[in-house]
Amino acid sequence: MKNLTIVADSNIASLDEFFNPVALGQNTEQQVQVIRVAGRDINAQLLADVQPDVLLIRSVTSINESLLSDNNSVKFVGSATIGTDHVDQKYLAERNITFANAAGCSKHSVAQYVVTAILTLRPQYGAKSMTPLTVGIIGLGNIGSTLAQYASDLGWKILGYDPLLATSDINNASLEQVLSQSDILSLHVPLTDTKDTDTQGAVSISNNVSDYPTRHLINAETLALMSPHTMLINSARGPVIDAAALEADIDATERQVVLDVFEHEPQISESLLSKLAIATPHIAGYTLEGKLRGTQIIYDALCEKLAVLPVLSMQQLLPLNTYLWSELKENPDILPKFYDIKKDDAALRSKIKSGKVKGPDFDQLRRDYHLRREWQTSMVSVTV
């Protein structure tokens, strides 16, 4: 077998530990070369020049024909992320390129981010509160269903909507009910589009097409269905919310809005930032556990592709964790010790220059982010 060349987003955790000859079951005569590149700098010219065997990415790298048309070597693409809207999976299948993503890797990280945002802005809703709280969740996949677990553990009422899943205890409401009856509305959907028709009548299909498109799911019409007192949280994909409509809505309602993702990311206007209750630089899933789990999943998938047994587990790399969910839920006052979300908010706002946060500064915040720890929990998966 020839040497193995890997081009990898430099923001993927523990590349050295997971992608080396020993961990990948290669013999001593074979080398594994890992070329680290900023995710937005992985381009067609680089892949044409390097001709790697493996491409490891995160969500900022779009995988499509324009990227790979001049490359004949890539046989495996791994995305250390939950979402797949940045990957043209049909094209990869046509090229016989194996694809793997890290489904579920950051479900606890993101759910804990949402709980943190809620308790930071509305601390009266802690576990011992007698004040009723209804949490609306749109999208009940890995993250949404995990958030429902935390909400249930805190005694909160859950209204859930996911048209792709069967009715259940948490998938229990219509979209209109979730929008109009929730105190908190949290978005956990993939970014999908519908079929578009051009002026000649031909059908143009985007990479991720759905009968339930989510691009601009939250727009002027859906915002109008929501109470002004409903807090809106988006940690899914930025374009799920129409940014212009959101700004107009906040001006009119003074709604509390928490955004970890933005429609025009990585650039963010000061006008939008100034209206948000909390804003963070796409780091909801950035825990040590979440990042390592993402690497572990694509490492395991690559080992399967290479027909070797995985020899490394993320548990071997994790230091002691003393952050216990059971302790926090009984005493929400200690939340800042677990995760001080306001520090991430302040860090993003500090990057405003000439009326906006610029792309390189946004990416630097993500690249240099000090990974927080997940709260230890014994929760089991909710079946939906």
Image (tube, rainbow, N blue to C red):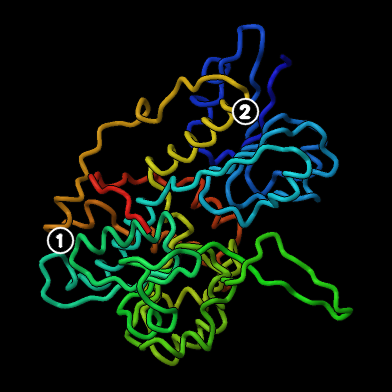
Local SS, label 1: helix
The residue singled out by tag 2 in the image is 305
Residues packed near mark 1 inside 10 Å, few (<14), some (14 to 19) or many (20 plus)? few
Do the CB atoms of the residues marked 2 and 1 lie less than 8 Å apart?
Answer: no
The residue located at (75%, 38%) in the rendering is: 96
Q: Is residue 73 left or right of residue 113?
A: right
Give the percent coordinates (x, y) of residue 60.
Answer: 61, 52
In this rendered view, identify the residue nearer to me: 295 or 266.
295
In the rendered image of this protein, does residue 222 appear above or below residue 121?
Answer: below
Quadrant for the C terminus, please. bottom left
Give the percent coordinates (x, y) of residue 15.
Answer: 53, 30
Task: Decide if residue 258 is in sight here.
Answer: no
Q: Amino acid at mark 2?
A: Lys
Q: Residue furthest right?
A: 200
Q: Earlier in the sequence, mark 2 or mark 1?
A: 2
The residue located at (44%, 79%) in the rendering is: 175
In the rendered image of this protein, does residue 24 appear above or below residue 361?
Answer: above
The residue located at (74%, 74%) in the rendering is: 196
In this rendered view, identify the residue nearer to me: 174 or 308.
174
Q: Is residue 153 left or right of residue 270?
A: left
Task: Decide if residue 34 is in sight here.
Answer: yes
Give the percent coordinates (x, y) of residue 320.
Answer: 25, 32
The residue located at (20%, 60%) in the rendering is: 153
In the rendered image of this protein, does residue 99 appear above or below residue 167?
Answer: above
For residue 333, the mark is: 1
In the rendered image of this protein, does residue 208 appear above or below residue 199?
Answer: above
Give the percent coordinates (x, y) of residue 296.
Answer: 47, 34
For residue 135, the mark is: none
The picture quadrant where one finds residue 234 is bottom left
Q: Amino acid at mark 1?
A: Asp
Residues packed near mark 2 inside 10 Å, few (<14), some (14 to 19) or many (20 plus)? few
Distance, label 2 to label 1, CA atoms, is 47 Å
